[in-house]
Amino acid sequence: MTDIGSDPLWDDYRHLALEHSLKACWSIPIISSEDRVLGTFAMYYEEPRPPVPGELVLVDTAVRLATVAIERTNAQEMAAHFAEILEEAINEIYIFDAGNFMFLQVNKGARDNLGYTLEELRDMTPEDLNPGLTPDFFRKLEPLVYGGREKMRFTCVHQRKDGTKYPVDAYIQLSNYKGLRVFVANVIDMTDLKKTEEELKQHVEQLSKKSRYESIIRAVTESVHRSLDLGGVFDNAVDALNRNVEGATNVVIFMVEGTDAVMKANRGHADWYVKRVKRVPYPIGATWKTILDRKARYVSDTDLDDTIGPAGKEFGTRSYLSMPIWSGNQTVGCIHIHSQEKNAFSVEDLDMLQIVARQLEAAINNAKQAEALRKSEEDIKQKLGELSKKKRYEEILSAITRSVHSSINLDQVMKNAVDTM
């Protein structure tokens, strides 16, 4: 606006400008690389006039510099936010150079578990943490480099600074970090799962005299390790139990959904029974008693049981086993084995059912862990993208700054700035 005193756009604010001797204004919007308005840059004059060509170049350059500075600040803030997410992630996150394999960044979860500082880890490679790595390990990563694979999984053992070891699953992919080609490893400490598997092994050995128990445990365990589909795991479990538990008439699994216990899998029940007990409202019947009491139950004679519902009695259930299913510290469901005979089961049957329930708990945790891993990988991918973008901004700003410091010729500085961007 060459004359604030007469321009209608200044009708509401003219008096403010004139009070400060502002007679003309030249304003340009600051537009982001994503075509969003970040702000404006304006030059004011003490007399009515348009800007001269040199001033237009100066304003254009200033706007470009302002855009770079604002986006760089925004990128730094976003990078800091994602870095915080990465740092506090439950999984162990490692970023190491794809050329020399030296660690560049390791998050808090990994540092705390290993006992090393970040400075110590930056002088190390994955080989230093995995004494059992074979010499061809790094060659196995070549499909990631040459595009044959997007992600690879490795099972190995990490060694802490104090010499103790723990099993891990590592998911590795190729990415970019601060302008470098890197490998990103998302690592899960498998100590608890291995401990559970070892406990399971001990229980199975104690029950090995009963071949049907071995068949049940094997079928359920293989299902848990083969698939993250909870529905399939549940279905395999009830099938194995119904076929191999002596005296079992039917088997059913319920999971808590809101205020209902919902049937997720069953074997041996009539269609009318399934329809009637598909959803059991809180806190009715034997199902909710097991969930709320949070402990296993063996009812050897339903004539003496006041919790079984009318549908169960109509179906002819005379005795049953009931086991809660846990996730963390919460009971999230239960599994029943029914028989149409009294005193059909034993304490050993209850022990076996506890093992099955623990495997179902592992399946639930595996499904949750898979979802957490997927989200973690998405966060990492987005963060690394933002860091790469930040690097480009820094290179532009650095080039302009060098030009300013190396020349006092304004035209040359302006030309270098425009050429750089």
Image (cartoon, rainbow, N blue to C red):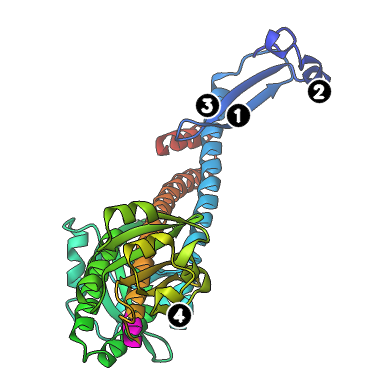
Disc 4 marks which amino acid? Answer: Asn
Disc 2 marks which amino acid? Answer: His
Disc 3 marks which amino acid? Answer: Val
Say whether residue 358 is left or right of residue 145: right
Kind of element beneath mark 3: helix
Dot 1 and dot 4 residues touching (CB under 8 Å) = no
Nearer the observer: mark 1 or 4; the answer is: 4
Disc 1 marks which amino acid? Answer: Thr
The residue carrying mark 1 is: 40
**Span shown in magenta:** 347-352
The residue carrying mark 2 is: 20
Real-space Cα distance between discs 3 and 2? 26 Å
Say whether residue 19 is left or right of residue 1: right
- Count neighbours of disc 3 (C-alpha within 10 A) and say few if under 14, some if 14 to 19, many if 20 or more: some
Say whether residue 95 is left or right of residue 212: right
Nearer the observer: mark 4 or 2; the answer is: 4
Instruction: Please give the label number shown on residue 386.
Output: none
> Above or below — where is 394 with respect to 334?
above
Real-space Cα distance between discs 1 and 4? 49 Å
Query: Which of marks 4 and 3 precedes in the sequence?
Result: 3
Percent position of residue 11, x then y: 74, 11
Instruction: Please give the label number shown on residue 57.
Output: 3
Image quarter (top left, top right, bottom left or bottom right) of the C terminus: top left
Dot 3 and dot 2 residues touching (CB under 8 Å) = no
The residue carrying mark 4 is: 113
Real-space Cα distance between discs 3 and 4? 56 Å
Query: Which of marks 2 and 3 precedes in the sequence?
Result: 2
Kind of element beneath mark 4: helix
